[in-house]
Amino acid sequence: MAQSAAFTSEMIRSELEEIVGQAYISTTETDKLIYSTDWAWMPQMWLDRGERLATPDYILHPGTKEEISAIVKLANRFRLPVVPWGGGSGTQGGALSIYGGILIDTKRLDKIIEINEKALTVTAQAGINGSQLEWALNEKGLSLMHYPASANCATLGGYLAPRGSGTISTKYGKAEDLVMRFEVVLPNGDIIRTPHVPNHASGPDYMRLFLGSEGVFGIFTEVTMQVDYQPEARLLRAVLFESVANAVEAGRRIMTRRLDPMVIRMYDPGSTASQVKQFLGYELEGAYMVIGWDGDPDIAALQEQKGMEICTELGARDLGREPGEHWWEHRYDFYYPPKSLKLPWMYGTTETVTTYDRLETLYYAKKKAIEETYKDHNAKYIGHFSHWFHWGASLYDRFIVEEPPENAQEALRLHNRIWNTAITTSLEHGGMVNEHHGVGLKLGRYMPRQYGEAWPFLQTLKKAIDPNGIMNPGKVGFGF
Amino acid sequence: MTSAEVKFFENVIETTENCRYCLMCRHTCPVGLGTHNETLTPHGWGLTIASVKRGLLTWNDETVDALYSCADCGNCRAHCVFDQPLPDAIAAARAEVAAQNLAPAVVYEFDEMFKQWGNPYQPQAPEPASHQGDVALFVGDESLYLWPSALEAALKLLKAIGIEPVLVGSGRSNGYLASSLGLPETARSLAQAVIEDVKASGASQLLVLSPGDAFAFNRLYVERLGMAWPDDVIVQEVTVLLAEKLEAGELTITPLDDETPYVYMDPTHTVRVPERVEAPRNLLSALYQRPGIEVFWRKDRAHPAGNTALQFTQPDLSNQLTMGRLYDALSVGARRVICEDPGTLSALKPGAERVKLDLVGLYELLADHV
Ligand SMILES: Cc1cc2nc3c(=O)[nH]c(=O)nc-3n(C[C@H](O)[C@H](O)[C@H](O)COP(=O)(O)OP(=O)(O)OC[C@H]3O[C@@H](n4cnc5c(N)ncnc54)[C@H](O)[C@@H]3O)c2cc1C
Ligand code: SF4
Ligand code: SF4
């Protein structure tokens, strides 16, 4: 039995090697282990406790879209799972090879094809590193304006796959709003390109189908994004509200009056007392809010003035520029060990998004559900309101259990139960399953509830696009 | 183990425990970016070392090969908000592997060379300090054996500002390479010998030819090797001193009438001494009367050339890094590449010839124009 498996495995390996070349296929135990985890807490904890995870059988580093197409065709022939991998920075287990198969690391597709300074677009291969792309644009006085905390590790394709958001998405939009067009290798191996402009009336917008598909509908190979000139001015300041209610209302008024801030980041009192103190060194009571405007200095200054009037009306204390600028400078420090959230703690970012009429209720409902249900585990709930829209905002909330069970299985069970409480509460109070981290493996089970009668429609689409179910099976709620 | 060694070891273990699940500096890791392989990233090395500790992997040919693929260039640490000393942790893991006789054969061959000759290049004993004086110049092994013209030119430049230094450490490795290969004891003996040479010279200022030497004496000895650098000896790079003198009007550079598009190539280890990046550029601007073109991987994000331990343990990877630097220069339209570090220059030379880039030593270029 083992010998016949080895035989089949070698036959497939040889074929894959022919496609990508000997240097770009790996089946070593070390590589398999390293590629067995992304940045989700579950696999990280599993390894931390000395347990093994499912691994890919073949790790491939294709250098062209044609190679990816050939790999996908082979995978259909042998009915092998194909898992796209960008930077492995996803937090939802979306890049885990839970059924083994072929892992396609896209990072060799890392070239910038064109920076168009007239149309203000950049076309790059999907495996390019986010910060590298940003630096290249900065050389020309441009910026992608998509600033996720994971820019150092994520890829361009990985920005689009889960519909990511960056720090200044409030003004510039999510990654999905910045995309002009892309090229994608479909599950049958065909390579298609979307039209060169995203807004038109030339039939249905099938482009959107791929945004948020997390590899279940295909693999991005090339992407054109909108870019901006680097802003002349960036004005940041911080204010302190006594209550979350007033802070949310201030954000709502700023957004609905279209004052166009690049960022509104409002920390709840728990985060203000913990994270703001730990990382920024300010000891404050209440809801700490950073607000920023950018672009033309005169316009930004006027917008800021109007925004500050709203904050003052709602009782905010102006903390001045320094705490806002300091936050901007250190906004990613939260993600560096040893001070970031890390094992052996248990934690999860259960972020969501909803409309203004439900935002506050949603926040308190989740806080109550997590803190009360998991009182015995001393579960903490903290949150900030991170990405704002004309109609609502995202709640970037987290649970933290500092002393989770020692046993890996017990820890995983507790983790999944807390997530269940968080997501169920989100759904009950008008929140979405997720705002920008995606669904992955972790949240797939909530898809039928999220979409109701539309879910079978999505399943039908999946079946039509990927009849053999090879693309990233087990993710986004789709089975194998 | 001494208490300093115990502390270092604990710190190192803590570092891999942090880095194993962190992805925040991989955008600057030249090996990760060049190989596109998750295993060969700061996170990958952290996770590999942590997994050996947890019994999920063992040290064998495959894992050791990965362990010896880190360039020990310092980019990760330079971009780490909390200054995690990952390269030190990797060197410590290599030391563990080397002590178990599992390191690549070349490590043991080099250990013998270091022990016998104080350098890995020539079977020739290092020279003692030439005489006594207030200012010394560390010659090392790379400038003696790999790129001798840099030393001669640097001496001429120093003379132009009135300095005739005592030569110390001629033919002796500064210990970085041994430490990087996982030979901490050998590295300590080399470091001790350098310190004794410097003390014997009676100098209070030690000039060095490259940022690699500055890093070794100012940081590596203390942080990685647990050794004390003499308090009364200040280390300064020759380029930094020359730039100071230029600014003070004590050094005059005759402008060069040459339109060749040039880049200044930051030497290997620049990221570890980021405060030095403007000095060579200022010297070149004075010479050419215009700034050079800048490559993409420059200054505080400069990638190393292949002149690290990789050139012995992973020659292909080392070559890939070197060629990466040259392609970076070509891609911005440069025809001439200028650098002062003997190690970096000697690594760049064969590739520069292949891609027809004019490779010039900074000291040599300046020495002809003072
Ligand atoms: C420290 C840190 C901070 C973070 N901050 C943010 C943040 O501010 N904003 C945010 O939105 N996210 C954030 N994330 C989450 C994560 O980084 C993003 O979701 C990121 O965009 C994922 O990109 P990646 O290249 O690492 O993808 P991976 O983790 O490799 O993959 C994620 C999913 O996308 C699929 N995929 C990857 N590449 C492709 C492709 N080319 N084609 C099709 N499918 C593909 C994978 O199969 C997987 O399902 C953060 C993560 C970390 C570790
Ligand atoms: S060195 Fe710092 S940034 Fe890099 S992996 Fe380690 S902790 Fe993360
Ligand atoms: S020392 Fe250099 S090669 Fe090694 S992990 Fe750090 S950045 Fe990468």
Image (tube, rainbow, N blue to C red):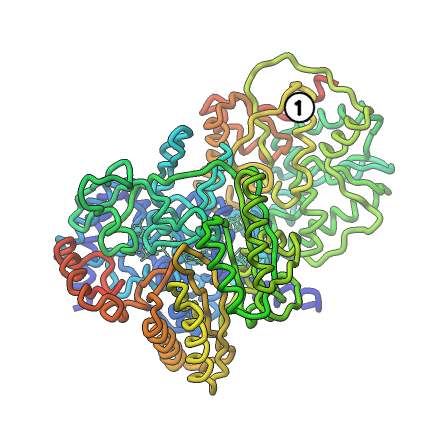
Compare residues B189 and A383 and report the one nearer the observer: A383
**Is ligand 3 closer than 8 angstroms to the Cβ of mark 1?**
no
Task: In the rendered view, tell whether residue A343 sits above or below residue B167.
Answer: below
Residue A251 x %, y %: 49, 59
Q: Disc 1 designates what residue?
A: B285
Label 1 element class:
helix
From the image, which quarter does the N terminus of chain A lie in? bottom left
Residue A135 x %, y %: 49, 40
Query: Left or right: where does residue B360 sit relative to residue A4?
Result: right
Q: Quadrant of residue B245?
A: top right
Residue A406 x %, y %: 45, 81
Number of labels in the image equals 1
Q: Residue at x 51, y 46 (%)?
A: B28
Q: Can residue A467 be seen in this view?
A: yes
Q: Residue at x 80, y 23 (%)?
A: B160
Q: Quadrant of residue A436?
A: bottom left
Q: What residue type is labelled 1?
A: Ser
> Residue lying furthest bottom in this view?
A376
Compare residues A452 and B142 and report the one nearer the observer: A452
Task: In the rendered view, tell whether residue A480 sits above or below residue B305.
Answer: below
Q: In which quarter of the image is ligand 1?
A: bottom left
Q: Can residue B105 be seen in this view?
A: no
Q: Residue at x 45, y 61 (%)?
A: B48
How crowded pointer 1 is (Cα within 10 Å; few <14, some 14-19, many 20+) is rated as some
Residue B73 x %, y %: 56, 46
Parent chain of label 1: B
Q: Residue at x 80, y 37 (%)?
A: B136
Task: In the rendered view, tell whether residue A243 sits above or below residue A104.
Answer: below
